Amino acid sequence: MAKVVIGMSGGVDSSVAAYLLKQKGHEVIGLFMKNWDDASVTLTSSCTWEDDLMFAEMVSKKLDIPLHTVDLTKQYRQRVVDYMFAEYERGRTPNPDVLCNREIKFDIFIDECLKLGAEYVATGHYCRKETVVIDGKETHRLLAGADPNKDQSYFLCQLSQNQISKALFPIGELLKPEVRKIADEQGLATATRKDSQGICFVGKVDLPTFLQQKLIAKKGDIIEISESFYEGKKTTEDLKELSKAYIYRREDGKVLTQHRGAHFYTIGQRKGLNIGGTGKAMYVIAIDVHENIVFVGRGDDHPGLYRRALFIAKEESHWVRPDLSLDIEHSKDFLVRIRYRQPLQNATVISKPEGLYIVFEKPQRGIAPGQFAAWYDQGELIGSGVINN
C-alpha cells in the first residue's frame, strides 16, 4: 500500500475519499489548504476557511489520520485571483476553478504533499483515472465521473500527464447519494454539510463587488441589438470568419439604460441588467470594455447569443493526451463542452497552424472568450483550451 496525502477541504467528498483510502490500507495523511481569508467580499459567513478547517479536523480525528495545514493564500491570489482580474479587465470570462486545479491543487499543493513523503495525492473530485501502457509507456487517462450529475472532469481539463500520474480520485466511481450515505454510516461530521458554492476557495460572492477590489466601476450604456442586424450575415463556411464573434458598434442599436462597468458582465448573462418591461428577457450578447458598452439582445433565441464555431490559439491549446493531439490540417469528431455541467455537444476539432477551430453540429449559446472548451472521446477527457474569441 502507498503513502497518500489527501486534500481535506472540510466537505463530504474529501472526507469520504479519505475514509475509502484508509479502508484500502493506504497510509493516509490529511492536508488542509488555506487559500483565501478575505471575508469582506463573500455573501455568506457560513463557509469561511475557519469553518472548513474545523470540519476537516473533526473528520481527521474520527478517521484517526494526521492533519497538516498549509497557507497558500499568497500563491492563490497571484495565480488565480490576479488572473481573474486581468481577464475580466480584458472583457473575457475566466474559469477560476480550472485555474485553481492547474495552478494550486495539482501544482503547489502537490509539492507540499511530496514534502510529507506522499507517493500519491488524492482529492474528492468526481472523476476517474485509468493507467494503460501504450507503446511500452505508461499513459494516464482522465475519465468522466460515474455520477453524470456531478462529473467534475471539466475542472481538471488543464492537467498534464505528470500531474495526473500522481493523482488518485477515490470517489470517482460513486454517485453523490452513495457518498452521503457512507459519510452518514461512518458518523462523519460532514455527512449533511452543504456543498460549497461560488468561486473555488473564495465562496459565494457578488462578482461586481469582488472585482471592484481592482477594477473601477464606470457608468456606460446598455445598447439593444435587434434581430434585423443579422439579416444576411454569417453565411460563410470559412473557419476564421465562422469562429469570430459579431462585432457591434454604438450605432448598430439603441440605448436602453446604463450599467456600472462593462467588465462586470459576461456573455449570456441575464441577471443584473435591471431592464424591465421589455416582454422577453434581455441577455448580454457582447461587451466592449474599451468603449464601456454592454450589448444586449431580446429573448433566449436571439441570434447574437448563438455561434457555430470557436477558436483556440495554438499557445492556449492543451492536450491531456499528447499522444492523441491532432497534426496540422487534420480533424476529428469529439464531444465538447464549454462550461461545467453543459451537456456534451457533437463537434469537429480542426487543427490549423494558428491553433484549433471547433465547429459544432448545432449553434452553441453563450460562447465567451476566456472560457475553457474541453473535448472528450468515449468518456475520456482528451484536451482543452481557452476560447480566444
Image (tube, rainbow, N blue to C red):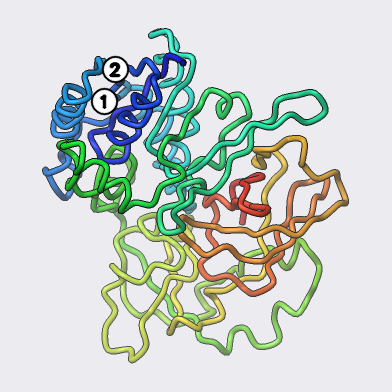
Where is residue 165? Give x, y as percent: 58, 25
**Residue 208: x %, y % from top left:** 28, 53
Category of crowding for the residue at label 2, using alpha-carbon neighbours closer than 10 angstroms: few (below 14), some (14–19), many (at least 20):
few
Query: Which residue is denoted by mark 2 in the rendering?
Result: 70
Establish if 220 lies above or below 328: below
Pinpoint residue 228: horizontal percent, then vertical percent: 58, 89
Query: Spatial distance from mark 2 to mark 1, Cα to Cα?
Result: 6 Å
Secondary structure of the residue carrying tag 2 is: strand
Report x, y in % for residue 108.
44, 20
Number of numbered discs present? Answer: 2
Q: Secondary structure at mark 1?
A: strand
Outermost residue toward the right in this view: 329
- Drawn side of residue 322 relative to residue 302, left or right: right
Dot label at residue 323: none
Quarter of the image for residue 6 reads top left
The amino acid beneath tag 2 is: Val
Q: Are marks 2 and 1 in contact (CB under 8 Å)?
A: yes
Residue situated in front as seen by the camera: 191 or 331: 191
Name the residue beneath numbered marker 1. Answer: 34
Q: At 76% across and 61% down in the image, what residue appears? A: 240
Which residue: 44% across, 80% down? 224
Instruction: Tell me the kind of residue under disc 1.
Output: Lys
Q: Could you classify mark 1 by the number of other residues whose Cα lies within 10 Å: few (under 14), some (14-19), or many (20 or more)?
A: some
Quarter of the image for residue 346 reads bottom right
Left or right, residue 162 beside residue 1: right
* Earlier sequence position, callout 2 versus callout 1: 1
Q: Nearer the viewer, residue 373 or 245?
A: 373
* Depth order, front residue of 54/23: 23
Q: Quadrant of the C terminus?
A: bottom right
Q: Is residue 354 left or right of residue 82?
A: right
